[in-house]
């Protein structure tokens, strides 16, 4: 059986394809919402984060023959845990990684390496910051916020994320609970209505709506701060489900 760490909508689609092709797999997701989405597609699923020891124990208990890491490109800790577990249990590690967007060379687009860099750059550039980087990054921007600035967070409308934002001091008017990705027109509407002058985003690829966010920024004359992907030296990287399936077929012969 393959353990498939599914952290994105496109990874669930690939998991469906693999299962349809006869690959026996178990999805692992962090949230009950992810579990609901997976099970609605007929995918067997476990829920909850696992630390290094927990993941190793789970792999051994269920006699896993390989681990597929389909977590978000920015989920460094989850990827490192998966890689360590594969090494400790002696099973193959395969990485499903969504393709990056090619970023334009524009005077209004600023590329940075970390969330901390993004917070510093955003507050240096403007006073109304629109965050599209997820609820787990909010504390970084709150720490850097100045008295005269405003932070707006667009996050998934889940209790944990909304509660975290409120605990950090975000007012209800500064929390937009919506599930993306969004098209250019919706991004424009939200950015404009929020009176944002800076948008902070990850280079999450086509599936994460990077291009649509940047197109909206350009149309509205806004500055964009893009956090580049972490660069990890990982083996067996695949960008498509077809590539991954072929690799698994060769592996499981």
Image: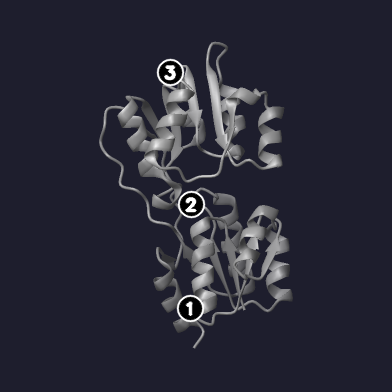
Residue topped by disc 3: 126
Can residue 103 be seen from the camera position used here? yes
Say what secondary structure mark 3 lies in.
loop
78 vs 83: above or below: above
Residue topped by disc 2: 73
Query: Which residue occupies the foreground of this view, 6 or 173?
Result: 173
At x 40% / y 72%, what residue is drawn?
A: 242
Query: Which residue occupies the foreground of this view, 122 or 54?
Result: 122
Q: Residue furthest bottom?
A: 253
5 on left or right of 45: left
Foreground tag (2 vs 3) = 3
Query: Which residue occupies the foreground of this view, 183 or 49?
Result: 183
Question: In the rendered structure, are the residues bearing label 3 and label 1 in contact, judged by CB atoms less than 8 Å apart?
Answer: no
- Figure quadrant of residue 198: top left
Count the labels in the image.
3
At x 71% / y 40%, what residue is drawn?
A: 159
Residue topped by disc 1: 248
102 vs 54: above or below: above
At x 48% / y 20%, what residue is drawn?
A: 128
Residue 71 place in picture, x, y as percent: 54, 57
Say what secondary structure mark 1 lies in.
helix
């Amino acid at each position: 059986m393959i353990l498939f760490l599914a952290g994105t909508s496109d990874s669930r689609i690939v998991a469906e394809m693999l299962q349809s092709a006869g690959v026996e797999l178990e999805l692992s997701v962090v949230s009950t919402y992810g579990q609901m989405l997976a099970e609605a597609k007929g995918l067997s699923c476990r829920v909850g984060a696992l630390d290094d020891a927990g993941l190793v124990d789970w792999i051994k208990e269920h006699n896993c023959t390989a681990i597929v890491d389909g977590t978000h490109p920015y989920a460094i800790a989850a990827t490192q845990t998966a890689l360590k577990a594969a090494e400790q249990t002696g099973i193959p590690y395969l990485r499903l990684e969504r393709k990056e967007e090619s970023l334009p060379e524009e005077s209004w687009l600023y590329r940075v390496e970390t969330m901390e860099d993004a917070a510093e750059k955003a507050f240096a550039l403007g006073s109304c910051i629109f965050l599209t980087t997820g609820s787990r990054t909010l504390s970084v921007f709150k720490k850097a916020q100045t008295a005269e600035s405003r932070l707006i967070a667009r996050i998934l409308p889940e209790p944990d994320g909304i509660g975290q934002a409120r605990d950090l001091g975000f007012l209800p008017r500064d929390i937009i609970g919506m599930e993306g990705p969004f098209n250019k027109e919706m991004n424009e509407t939200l950015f404009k209505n929020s009176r944002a002058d800076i948008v902070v985003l990850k280079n999450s690829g086509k599936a994460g709506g990077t291009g649509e966010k940047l197109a909206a920024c350009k149309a509205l004359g806004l500055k964009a701060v893009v956090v580049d992907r972490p660069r990890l030296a990982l083996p067996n990287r695949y960008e498509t489900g077809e590539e991954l399936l072929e690799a698994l077929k060769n592996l499981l012969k």
